[in-house]
Amino acid sequence: MRLWLLPVLACVFAQAGAPAWAADAPPGASSCTGCHASVKIADSVIPHIAGRKAAEIVAAMGAYRSGAWPSSVMGRIAKGFDDRQTAAIAAWFAARPE
Amino acid sequence: MATRRALLKGAAALSFAPAIAMAQGTGAGRVVVIGGGFGGATAARTLKALAPRLDVTLVEPNAVYTSCPYSNGVLAAVREMSQQQFRYDGVRRAGVTVAQTSATAVDASARTVTLADGNRLSWDRLVMSPGIDINWTALPGYDEAAAQKMPHAWKAGAQTVLLRRQLQAMDDGGLVVMSAPANPYRCPPGPYERASLIAYWLKTWKPKSKLLLLDAKDAFSKQRLFQNAWTQEYPGMIEWVPLSKGGAVTSVDPSALTFVTDFARHKAAVANVIPPQKAGAIAALAGVADRTGWCPVEPVAFESTLRPGIHVLGDAAVMGAMPKSAFAANAQAKVCAAAIVDLLAGRTPVDPILINTCYSLVAPDYGISVAGVYRPDKGVLAEVPGAGGVSPLDVVGGYRGQEALYADSWFRTITGETFG
Ligand SMILES: Cc1cc2nc3c(=O)[nH]c(=O)nc-3n(C[C@H](O)[C@H](O)[C@H](O)COP(=O)(O)OP(=O)(O)OC[C@H]3O[C@@H](n4cnc5c(N)ncnc54)[C@H](O)[C@@H]3O)c2cc1C
């Protein structure tokens, strides 16, 4: 991921307090933050996923997609992403500050 | 896709050569954003976050934004107007210049925006997210004066307060009549959420009252979920009249609070007209709206197919299969901002994937949702097959209550992501 961070954009992450959307966001990731806030919201019932281990996110997405984990909305969303896309999104969230 | 790429590149090469030269390698450049709603405020903040050296100006006449999402709860007196309101401090903190005025003209070839305060702004890229305007010529009898008697409340604010006041002043036993327009319009499930929450309020405070919903369509978003919930929660209170049963309203008579269809006249105690709509008026002035009243865009950077260099987001744009929602406007804005940063640096943006989810409350503790995943396909945003869909029809336990809680958290998230 980090490899294709362009110099122009790298400075974003140096900025303290900058919102966590980033230009290296792989396709789909910026839509997840419509529900999974980039900055943690107190007592939100939607789980916070920024800073979570990539493997955990990949496992959750796989389980939602297959139906192994029951969900309200994640099953319907996870089915829109293949393994490669999911892995890229998971790595991106894992690299966000929690 | 090849054609689209060529078109994007062509546009960049022809009209934006100076901008590219200036922006390349420096991350600098000028972007003006018209409209500080879910699309525009998100786009402005995201642009600054991605490329801090960009000069970003947000043009928005109101000091306070009033959110339509959750405004149906204000009608049902489960929320107050103050909970719908957001200021632009977070947008300013992100480094965006906020010009508190309206855009009155756009010159696509000179690349300028003229403001109501007399100033003129230059841009390398223009983002427009002006939302909707009511199409005042589409429904005979329904003009701005009529909206004071038969409020639309489809732009939240004074109209929402007016409709709530009318409901509260109505005698028990009064008939509330609503009309819903043909597609496309802002927030496809919105009229049905509104009917539900008004019924919720009537059930407690005016239990002898009923609600008639006249519809210009034969089918609507989350239809079976809504209809099942109406039977269960509000038996006998909501009557939905589809197009094929004479639901299409052909004119209104505001002096008599009456809706006219081909078959009948319906007199209301309280009348809510959700009228036909079009892209915010500045879109037509800028030349980005077509004869339908909406703005065609390509599906990667949401650049106008009519005026290169101008990007249109949210309700104003024709986004293929994506509905007109706050969730969608926010998602499109983040994609558009990243694409603009790429374009200014001379790079080709990659094909995006977008999600939309619309939660609706049938009652404050009864939520349902529709979701979709979208990607560019043959020049438009199309649904990814096999993904998306609506909440299940049959559920056990606290499922609907849980979705209502998720909806509340979603509202807090999306307003935070938009306004900071
Ligand atoms: C009752 C109701 C309920 C809804 N519920 C939901 C929901 O639960 N979930 C959901 O996702 N969506 C919901 N929506 C839809 C949502 O409100 C819109 O889709 C969303 O606001 C679109 O964002 P936008 O940026 O396109 O437009 P807007 O948010 O309307 O923003 C447009 C902005 O542009 C400004 N503007 C217009 N013209 C100019 C000009 N010439 N110069 C400068 N500024 C200008 C306006 O002042 C406004 O601030 C609902 C809508 C309604 C009516």
Image (cartoon, coloured by chain):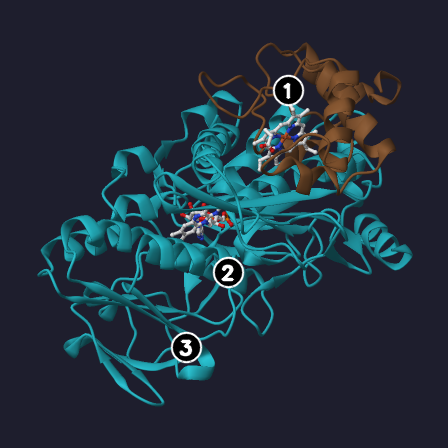
Q: Residue furthest bottom?
A: B263
Vertical order, B251 against B310 (above or below): below
Label 2 element class:
helix
Chain ID at mark 1: A
Vertical order, B377 against B351 (above or below): below
Q: Which chain is brown?
A: A
**What's the residue type where badge 3 is placed?**
Ala
For label 3, the residue is: B138
| Image-based side of A29 in relation to B192, left or right | right
Q: Which marked residue is nearer to the observer: mark 1 or mark 3?
A: 1
**What's the residue type where badge 2 is placed?**
Arg
Query: Quick check: can you spot residue B121?
Result: no
For label 2, the residue is: B224
* Mark 1 on the same chain as mark 3: no
Chain ID at mark 2: B
* Disc number for residue B52: none
For label 1, the residue is: A49
Q: Which chain is cyan?
A: B
Label 3 element class:
loop
Q: Quadrant of residue B179?
A: bottom left
Q: Is mark 3 within 8 Å of ligand 1?
A: no
* Mark 2 on the same chain as mark 1: no
Q: Residues within 10 Å of mark 1 (few under 14, many from 20)?
A: many
| Image-based side of A6 in relation to B34, left or right | right
Query: Between residues B394 and B76, which one lies in front from this camera angle?
Result: B394
Q: Residue furthest right?
A: B2
Q: Residues within 10 Å of mark 3 (few under 14, many from 20)?
A: some
Q: Quadrant of residue B294?
A: bottom right
| Image-based side of B28 in relation to B1, left or right | left
Chain ID at mark 3: B
Q: Who's the residue at 51% across and 64% down the image?
A: B220
